Image: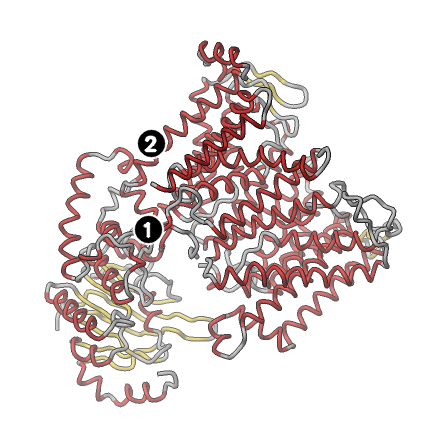
Amino acid sequence: MIEQLGNGLLLGVIIALGSVALSLLYGVTRIVNFAHGEIIAFGAIMTLFFSSSPDSSLLYLDRFSPLGINFIASVLLSTVLCGVFGGLLELLLFRPLRKNNFGNIAVLVVTIGLSIFLRHIYLLFASAKPTSYILELQRRQDYFGIQLTPRNVQVLIVGFIVMVLVGIFLTFTKTGKAMRAVRDSSELANVSGINSDYIILVTWVFSSMLAGFTGIIQGVINNVRWNMGFLILLLIFAGTVLGGIGTSFGAMFGGFIIGILVQLSVGLQFMDGHTEAKNAIALALMIVILLVRPQGIFGSKDRIS
Amino acid sequence: MSNSILSVKSLKKRFGGLEAVNVDSFELYEGEITSLIGPNGAGKTTFFDLITRFQSADSGSIFLNEKNVTKLNSYKLARLGMVRTFQLTRVFDRMSVYENMKFAGSSIKNEGFLKSLIQTKTLKQQEDHLNVKIDETLKLLNLIEMKDSYARELSGGQKKLLELGRSLMKNPKILLLDEPLAGVNPKLSEELLEIILNLNSQGINILMVEHNIDAVMKISKRVVVMAEGKIISDGKPDFVRSDQKVIEAYLGSSDD
Amino acid sequence: MNKYFTAFIILVLSFFYIFFSNDSGGGRVFVNLLTFAGIYGLAAIGINVHFGWTGLLNFGHAAFMGIGAYTTVLLIPHSLGREGVVISTGLPLPLAIILGLIASALLGLLLGLPTLRLRGDYLAIVTIAAAEIFRLLVRDFEDLTGGVYGIIQFSDSLQNSRPDFITQFSENYNISSAQLWVGLLTWFSIVFVLIILARLKKSPWGRALRAVREDEDAVRALGKNAVLLKLQSFMLGAAIGGLSGIFLVFNYGTVQASTFVPVLTFYVWAALILGGVGSLGGPALGAVIFWVIIAGTDTISRFLFESPDGQQLAGVRFVIVGLLIMFCMIFKPSGILGDKEELLLDVK
């Protein structure tokens, strides 16, 4: 079982980052964003596009050949692009819907349509086959009894640093404080003179950058696929619900728990030969949590009814 | 003094660090119009939510006609004859005024899945029979002209009336009105007050939260004042009006 | 009457399209399309009870469809799994179908109990998760469900009941007789279900569901048990979904883990929104138009790519489904047959 802990940490960091992004967006905009996974995939695919060598035929349409630029630069560029993407979604789609008084449920259905649309755009433009970044292959080593490659360790550290930075941003910067204010009560925020349109835009950009970064990390740890975001989305929901919808710290925590749980469950006795069912355990846990403590571990009760 | 029909003992509710409601004792007496007033944030609506079981109290107990209803579901409490309205009106927007009323009056048995599927003659008769009462009530509330309109087409005041009308379809023993006059124009307010007095004279006990002090003083037999979750004054309108604690509470609150 | 006229025109144009875009075997294509449309329409009618009538967001319909189908198929003679173990005994088909519907309704009860007390969007997440759990379990528990190898050779139970004149008719017109029989039964079921639903819709129960959709708190304040009403609605819609799932697997003649994938639910939602949320006949009409559009996407693929492969066909198809859901929800949320007054825009 312990040999799965490394995998658990890796999946955990992906889900935790994704959950923070989802939870932040939900907290501020009240949008349950089913297209979240597609923003995650966008980051990963863009990085693939920027960093792969120009002669590799990973993209479907031959008129787009990869750019072959430095990997770190690709990561930064893709993350920024995801932010732009999220900002455009808000400006062109979600803000007009809000101004026309679309209810949460109508918007939720729109995000489902958006998710299906984007995902299959990726399918048309990028290969359906799982593809890896051009990074050298590494062997797993022993770190305090946990099996990881050196790059895995780097990814974990970077992931932690990003989460700490998000925490600092939310707690100490003016924009971050304003985001939390809108999240906790948009009426109150309006009274205190916070421009909620601006804050919502910033939230979309910020959350999408974070989501895109999540996708890149997922791409480094596993590989890049057109439907990678959709596959991880349910686990991200589970992480968010477990930690408590609308709390950033809870989402991080919940994400890690879900990731570790999913991977550790592979080692359970009754799971022998049922590897596919490992995700089912996490999702079942989410449903149980909703049954016994719908506000999640760190959430407050008034968010749920 | 007449019989107590609703009795509340040491009811408490906290939200985080805030003590929203902390009421030692509260009684509602047979036959009276009682008003609950107090500055904004005094916990009046929360108190309403607690006694109608729309929120659960942290501690304390509630008795309706000496029956302990502290743990009862809100809808069961409503079946016992205690019906409430809401501060922000809650009409069924995309149903007609008539359907709003009919849903309220229809019996729970007839709303059973199988009964609705089989649709016996009795069910149809009982449903048709409701129309008499619906017409009567809508006439009383001056809403009869709007009978076939969608509820969302009504004005704010008319929605208040519809909500009241819906509650009346339940033949309530106790009617809890949460700010019945809020957003209602002065002329309609007068009418509403008349209607409330009229209902009371027909034996319906009324407890209402209301900000319009003049109206409250005019029609209430008894006024209860809340501030910071506690009841600070309780008595006849004249007594409350001159109570020093009440004056302080109102002057001391910045937002009223 | 205007919208019914629109619907009629759209249907006629759709049928013309089908016949003229297929030089050979128009009849076969037509039956295939109508059968699938009927099955999706029936499924959409189920979601309509949930969402259109009661305001419940069910995004796990594939699970309701699947559990009904698996229960029924496993109870009748079939052949299972990678070795094709033949189980030649079983219940009579009607009884198996009834048990399948009960299984779907029970899954509705199981999911509804914890979640129907919570706010609407939680239900969306939980149902989609439940559908995924269902799929993973079906995939993994191969001994019971046949896993990815699935179940085959169960169609005889249904096809044995096929009247001779349908077989004759099919031969004359070069149509698959098995599919024609499934298609006919599906559309008969739609009519039957709609008659029952029409009755329920204007009954006190139907009215109570609409009240729940509008405002649960007000329902409770009037002494009605909103959670019970939601549970009943959830179970009824789930059972209708189960029926559609049963027809789906009889149409394929097989069932495996990949039959009830999450995207199936989204297809059904697209059909529902297209036809008109809340209206009685809307979902079925929406499903027909949806399938015509799906057939049309292949033409678009051929226009975009010289010789489209499976990936491109699926890609274009779903890009259009996604756009369809978005555009309908934004610009015509009442769909073709929906009531303008019943727009679902401002539902919280």
Q: Quadrant of the N terminus of chain B?
A: bottom left
Write down the residue under mark 2. C195
Packing grade of label 1 (10 A; few <14, some 14-19, many >=20) is: many
User: Which kind of residue does numbered mark 1 sit on?
Assistant: Ala
Write down the residue under mark 1. C211
Residue at x-position 67% and y-position 35%: C302
**Left or right of residue C287, residue B23 in this image:** left
Quadrant of residue B56 in the image? Answer: bottom left
Q: Position of residue C81 (x, y in %)?
A: 64, 23
**Left or right of residue C50, residue A59 in this image:** right
Q: Position of residue B117 (x, y in %)?
A: 29, 35
Cα separation between marks 2 and 1: 22 Å
Q: Position of residue C320 (x, y in %)?
A: 59, 43
Residue at x-position 68% and y-position 68%: A166
Q: Position of residue A61 (x, y in %)?
A: 77, 44
**Left or right of residue C253, residue B99 in this image:** left
Closer to the chain start, of discs 2 and 1, is: 2
Quadrant of residue B44 in the image? Answer: bottom left
Figure check: A125 above or below C74:
below
Callouts 2 and 1 close, C-beta under 8 Å: no
